[in-house]
Image (cartoon, rainbow, N blue to C red):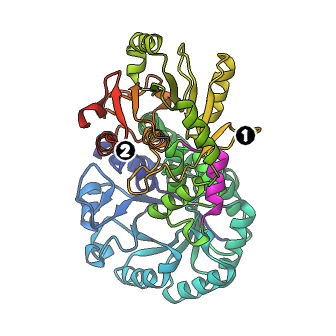
Amino acid sequence: MPKRYLLDCTLRDGGYINDWEFGHETIIEIFERLVSAKVDFIEIGFLDGRRKFDINRTIMPDTASANKIFSGLDKGQSIIVAMIDYGTCDIRNLQPASETFIDGIRVIFKEHLMYEAMEYIRQVKALGYKVFAQMVSVTTYTDVKLKEYANLVNKVKPFATSMVDTYGLLHPDQLLHIFSLLDEYLDKDICVGYHAHNNFQMGYANGISFLKSKTKRNILVDGTLYGMGKSAGNATTELLAMHMNELYGGKYDITQILEIIDNTILDIYRKQYWGYNLFFYIAASTKCHPNYVSFLMNKKTLSVSQIIDILNSLEFSKKLMYDAKYAEHVYVNYQNIVCDDRQALTELKKKLHGEKILLLGPGRNFQREKGKIKKYIAENAPIVIAVNYVPNNVDLDYIFLTNAKRYTQVKKDLQENDIHAEIIATSNVTKITDDFKYVVNYGELIDLNTEIVDNSLVMLLKLLIKLSIREAILAGFDGYSSKADNYFDVSREYSYVKEKSRYLNEYVSKFLLQNCQKLNVEFLTQSHYEFGK
């Protein structure tokens, strides 16, 4: 009867959460309890020649490091494996298997590297290790490619090859289709494994579907304790072990597994959450690398529907191979909806010409110095323009709206406070019904020669210059600090502003200096920008 194995990879895949810094005592406790639980395979970490040895981390430069960390420990009935991301660990970093604590090595690689990786796997096998060929992003393989891959694997004859659902895209029928082809074409003595990610909450469901396969070959499922792992996490070791005990004669000690979770994993989980969420659902549903989702969400200028539109428009060859420059290019192109704004500019010029202009931003100094701002308004009767928000208790004439994500809140605030300010929208913002009274071209106001192309203050100042406005007063445009909250309402703060505070301050200050002959700007409230003028 074919065997069904359980592999725990917490010390390896879980390490993405904490940069593999579990601490030596915790590493030992996790390992010893997994051995006591009689888990068949225990993956103890990455072998990566780029990293230095650290007894507290489970990412190691060579096999000799594993001997130092795990020296003297009893393996029990478990087989001990480590993982190598092909290209990150020279074969010279590997001792013969007889000289190291490690029994097997799993090598991960993408489809386009499978021939080179398989030659490396052949070399690893020659050192006496049980070797595993790990198919990263198995969903990228066509049926034809799967047959080609199987023929290649048959020539090397590793102990196992595993289907790695890197981005959590698979459902049971898709997984079983891929497995059926591998099962047909692979030599019968090669074990087939499955490694899940939980973007669709399908890790456990896929695992039990795979275990139910009517096959004559040995199969293996991966899990991590409490699902610990990058992105949406993994199938859970404790659930897989329970299921295998109930249906497949497993003898795993669930109590030992739960003790590890309670003693070590929950402390990590409380500090660094992992698991299913909207972010990873979007990545999986659009079949895109999660970094594209992160990039677009961090812009905080797009609605979810717009983000999905962009992700669906990505070139197929780019979707799972993240390209930062390409992401920025697609984002700008999507935002750059060209419109004929000549009439809007003419009307705005008539409305604003000869008037004092007061621009309001959402910095903390807007609240701190509100009395000063209201006094200025009372004494000077300026045209008041707020940027991407509705300020409380201030007479307002216009809102400059560049951010589609903020539109719904702006609309709600205007209605609830019975404010009749007009919206000046850039052309990337789509109104829910009808049209905005004033729409200006987004593409003519952004700056493609800088890191963050759509700084809303700079865009508004560019618009004023286009309208031949010579002077403007600014309040609530504080600039940015790497330490303090930068907005009076912290929910408005972009995720990147603390990290990019120096760049943002220098960029705006430089813009003000370069354009001071066209537009004189005075600050009514304190600002980091003021010192660069």
Residue type beneath disc 2: Glu
Badge 1 amino acid: Asp
Q: Nearer the viewer, mark 1 or mark 2?
A: 1
Q: Is residue 1 left or right of residue 55?
A: right
Q: Is residue 249 visible?
A: no
Q: Residue at x 37, y 44 (%)?
A: 29
Q: Residue at x 39, y 75 (%)?
A: 129
Disc 2 is placed on an element classified as helix
Determine whether 476 is above or below 403 in the image: above
Along the viewing direction, whichever of 250 and 129 lies nearer the viewer:
129
Which one is earlier in the sequence, the residue at label 1 or at label 2? 2
**Range of magenta residues:** 301-314
How many discs mark residues in the rendered view?
2
Q: Residues within 10 Å of mark 2 (few under 14, many from 20)?
A: some
Quarter-of-image position of residue 139: bottom right
Left or right: residue 483 compared with residue 387:
left
Is residue 39 shown above or below 519? below
User: Which disc is residue 494 wearing?
Assistant: none
Residue nearer the viewer, 441 or 52? 441
Quick check: is 135 in the magenta stretch?
Answer: no
Viewport quadrant of the N terminus: bottom right
Quarter of the image for the C terminus: give it: top left
**Residue 511 in picture, x, y percent from top left:** 33, 44
Q: Measured from the top left, where is residue 319 in percent x and y?
A: 57, 65
* Image disc number at residue 29: 2
**Point 68% across, 80% down: residue:** 143
Q: Which residue is mark 1?
A: 435
For numbered disc 1, what is the local secondary structure?
loop
Q: Do we see residue 144 in this rendering?
A: yes
Residue for point 40% across, 68% down: 85
Marks 1 and 2, how far apart in space? 63 Å
Please say whether residue 304 is one of the residues in the magenta stretch.
yes
